[in-house]
Image (spheres, rainbow, N blue to C red):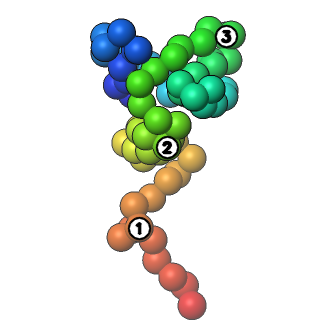
Amino acid sequence: MIQLTRLNGRPFSLNALYIEVIESFPDTTIKLTNGHKYVVRETEQEVNQKITLFYRNINVLSLRKSSEVFDDE
């Protein structure tokens, strides 16, 4: 789950696994795979950073921290 803020200032948690599209209209709008939409205060870049961190924390797509990557050459 990632922590976001609605335009009215209320925080909420969103399961990042269900995010399909993130757009700026200029407000950041997140569309989920079930069709629900959320408009948040965070920028598109901030949401992307939160998603990447979330994926790293739960080890989705085998994302590794840069210090864990080894070069075989």
Provide the residue designation for mark 1: 66
- Say which mark, if any, is on residue 45: 2
Q: Relative to residue 34, is residue 10 drawn left or right?
A: left
Provide the residue designation for mark 3: 34
Q: Does the rendering let one see residue 69?
A: yes
Mark nearer the viewer, 2 or 3 = 2
User: From this viewpoint, which residue is outermost toward the left?
Assistant: 10
Q: Relative to residue 61, is residue 10 drawn left or right?
A: left
Residue located at (42% from left, 31% from top): 42
Q: Relative to residue 13, is residue 20 drawn left or right?
A: right
Q: Secondary structure at mark 1?
A: helix
Q: CA distance from mark 1 to mark 2?
A: 20 Å
Q: What type is the residue that disc 2 sits on?
A: Gln
Mark 2 packing: few (<14 Cα in 10 Å), some, or many (20+)? few
Q: Quadrant of residue 3?
A: top left
Residue 50, percent across and down?
41, 38
Mark nearer the viewer, 1 or 2 = 2
Residue 18, percent across and down?
59, 22
Q: Does the rendering let one see residue 59?
A: no
Question: In this rendering, is residue 66 above or below 72?
Answer: above
Disc with the residue nearer the chain's start (1 vs 2): 2
Residue located at (63% from left, 19% from top): 31
- Say which mark, if any, is on residue 19: none
Disc 3, disc 1: CB below 8 Å? no
Q: Quadrant of the C terminus?
A: bottom right
Disc with the residue nearer the chain's start (2 vs 3): 3
Q: What type is the residue that disc 3 sits on?
A: Asn
Mark 3 packing: few (<14 Cα in 10 Å), some, or many (20+)? few
Q: CA distance from mark 2 to mark 3?
A: 23 Å
